[in-house]
Structure formats: C-alpha cells, structure tokens
C-alpha cells in the first residue's frame, strides 16, 4: 500500500467504508430515531450468526475520505451511528471530531474488543464471547446490548452487566434466526429481572436498512 494512503488510514482520515445510509434506528435505546449509519469494514470477532459477514474483510471495502462521508451526513441527519464490522479496529478520532464540529451527535456500536478511540455522545457496547471487551470500555458504555442465542447467554449477559457503570442501559436482544425460540424466554427473564429491557431488530420487521 502507498505510504501516504497508509498514513491517512492510520490517522483515520480514510476509512474502509462498506456502506452508508439514512434510516430509522432499529435496536436498543435509540430505537425509532432517524440517524445516518456509517458501516465500516473489518472485523475479526467472528460471530457465527453475524448478519453482515460481508463486512469482515476490510480489503473488500474502499478506503474512503472521511470528509466526503461527513458531507453526505450533513445532507440528511444530526445523528450518526458508526458501526461495522468492528469500527474500533480503526482510528475514530478524526471523523468524530469533524462530525462534532458540525454539531452532529455521534454514536458507536462496538464489541469493545479494541481500544476506544473517538469522542462519542453514546457508546453501545455489544460484547461477544468470541472476543471479549477490553476492560476500559465497560465504565464508558452508555448501553449494554447482549445478543441472546441460547439459554447460556443469560449468564453471559449478567456477567457483562456486572462490569458496566450503574446507570448503563441494559438490553437483551434475541438473535434474529432464533428469535421465535428465545423471545418468550427473554420476556420472562425481563419480567423477573426488570433492570433489563428488551431490544428487537425492529428495522427487520419494518423491512428497512
């Protein structure tokens, strides 16, 4: 790779953009709100049920000028969600600074498996067993969203919840392919443990991105 390009990527001025789109947030605390989504390529967490496995190989997604991405955001939204893949594989300092200079709120969804970079208004931590979060992110997370694929995941969720700050929002979300089986169990669990809330992938029910 050209050295100048590599420097821009290292600085976060160029990012491997998989896709960008304006939509309604479908999951977690901000469900139902309009936001511009920036999906960054690259992930080695390896969830077997991942619904965007095409994001895993960053080399498949072109290095894109972060300023160009921001110009697209400005046409549509005052809130951005940066997701992946695993966005924290890349330096998020530049793009978050420039977005906030435009008075745009910046959210991230991350597994927490990489060091936190960037200046965020909202951090959604979605931990995965395959590659656990780094310890530093737990106390910075505003939202903990745990995917429930089987009964053992409830124990994992409680273990992760024991590490976040007191006012962190706690969500259990059924894995989409197993939702019919797990949703009733999540409903029962939340009724017995009301510190938790249910997150659904409402964008899939609404058939929007």
Image (cartoon, rainbow, N blue to C red):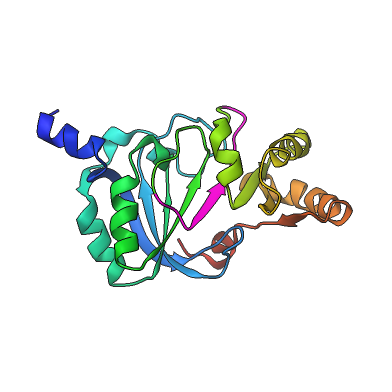
Q: Main secondary structure of the magenta part?
A: loop
Q: Residue 114 vs residue 182: left or right?
A: left
The residue at 21%/56% (across/down) is 67
Q: Residue 44 vs residue 141: left or right?
A: left
The quadrant of the rendering that contains the C terminus is bottom left
Please state the horizontal and vertical placement of residue 172, each as a whole percent of the image. 70, 49
Q: Nearer the viewer, residue 1 or 3?
A: 3
Q: Nearer the viewer, residue 30 or 18?
A: 30
Q: Nearer the viewer, residue 151 or 78?
A: 78
Q: Using the image, determine if residue 89 lies above or below residue 52.
A: above
Residue 98 falls inside the magenta stretch: no
The quadrant of the rendering that contains the N terminus is top left
The residue at 69%/51% (across/down) is 170
Residue 96 visible, this orientation:
yes
Q: Using the image, determine if residue 155 lies above or below residue 76.
A: above
Please state the horizontal and vertical placement of residue 25, each as a whole percent of the image. 51, 63
Q: Residue 196 vs residue 81: left or right?
A: right
Query: Which image quarter: residue 15?
Result: top left
Which contiguous range is marked in magenta?
119-130
Q: Residue 138 vs residue 68: left or right?
A: right
Residue 126 falls inside the magenta stretch: yes
């Amino acid at each position: 790779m050209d050295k100048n390009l590599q420097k821009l990527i290292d600085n976060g001025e160029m990012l491997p953009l998989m896709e960008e789109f304006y939509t309604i947030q479908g999951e977690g605390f901000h469900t139902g709100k309009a936001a511009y989504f920036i999906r960054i390529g690259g992930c080695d967490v390896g969830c077997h049920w991942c619904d965007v496995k095409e994001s895993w190989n960053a080399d498949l997604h072109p290095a894109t000028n972060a300023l160009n991405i921001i110009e697209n955001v400005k046409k549509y939204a005052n809130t951005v969600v940066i997701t992946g893949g695993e966005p924290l594989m890349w330096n998020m300092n530049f793009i978050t600074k420039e977005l906030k200079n435009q008075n745009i709120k910046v959210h991230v969804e991350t597994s927490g498996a990489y060091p936190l970079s960037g200046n965020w208004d909202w951090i959604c931590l979605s931990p995965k067993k395959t590659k656990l979060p780094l310890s530093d992110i737990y106390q910075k997370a505003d939202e903990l969203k745990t995917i429930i694929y089987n009964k053992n995941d409830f124990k994992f969720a409680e273990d992760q919840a024991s590490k976040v700050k007191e006012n962190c929002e706690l969500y259990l979300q059924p894995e989409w392919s197993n939702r019919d089986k797990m949703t009733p169990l999540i409903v029962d669990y939340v009724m017995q443990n009301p510190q938790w809330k249910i997150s659904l992938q409402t964008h899939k029910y609404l058939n929007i991105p």
